[in-house]
Image: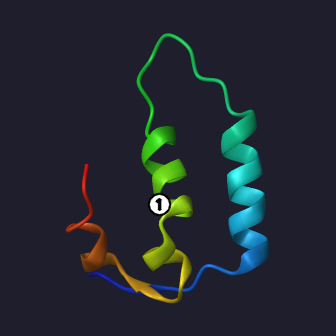
């Protein structure tokens, strides 16, 4: 069941920092998706329903 998520400034900063330091070799990961999500101004503006993520460009 989809739910709304509020991402705080602190969470966004820690997530962005962790993704910047992340190194994955030999397998595919979803790190680039998470980088785009944390950088998206619409998602940064406030609570987001998980259904909204379905419409984001790939």
x and y, in percent, of residue 23 in the image = 66, 24
Q: Residue furthest toward the front?
A: 41
Q: How is the image coloured?
A: rainbow
Q: Considering depth in this image, is 33 or 27 the residue closer to the camera?
A: 33
Q: Residue furthest top?
A: 26
Instruction: Name the residue: 25% across, 78% down.
Output: 51
Residue drawn at x 47%, y 40% as measured from the top left: 32
Report the quarter where the N terminus lies.
Answer: bottom left
- Percent position (x, y) of residue 17? 76, 49
What residue do we see at 47% from left, 60% from top? 37
* Viewer-closest of 48 and 41: 41
39 displayed left or right of 49: right
Residue plotted at (25% across, 49% down): 58
Q: Residue 11, image x and y in percent?
A: 72, 70
- Up-down relation of residue 8 to residue 58 (above or below): below
Disc 1 residue crowd, few under 14, some 14–19, many 20+, Cα 10 Å: some
Residue 49, horizontal then vertical, whole percent: 35, 84
- Answer with the quarter of the image where residue 57 lies: bottom left
Q: Find numbered disc 1 in the image and state the secondary structure of the residue it sits on.
A: helix
Snapshot quadrant of residue 27:
top left
Q: Give the labeled residue for mark 1.
A: 37
Figure check: 23 above or below 57: above
Lateral position of residue 14 relative to residue 42, left or right: right
Picture layout, residue 44 above or below residue 15: below
Q: Quadrant of residue 28?
A: top left
């Amino acid at each position: 069941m989809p739910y709304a998520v509020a991402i705080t400034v602190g969470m966004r900063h820690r997530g962005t920092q962790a993704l910047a330091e992340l190194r994955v070799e030999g397998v595919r990961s979803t790190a680039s998706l998470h980088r785009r999500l944390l950088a998206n101004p619409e998602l940064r503006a406030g609570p987001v329903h998980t259904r909204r993520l379905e419409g984001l460009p790939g």
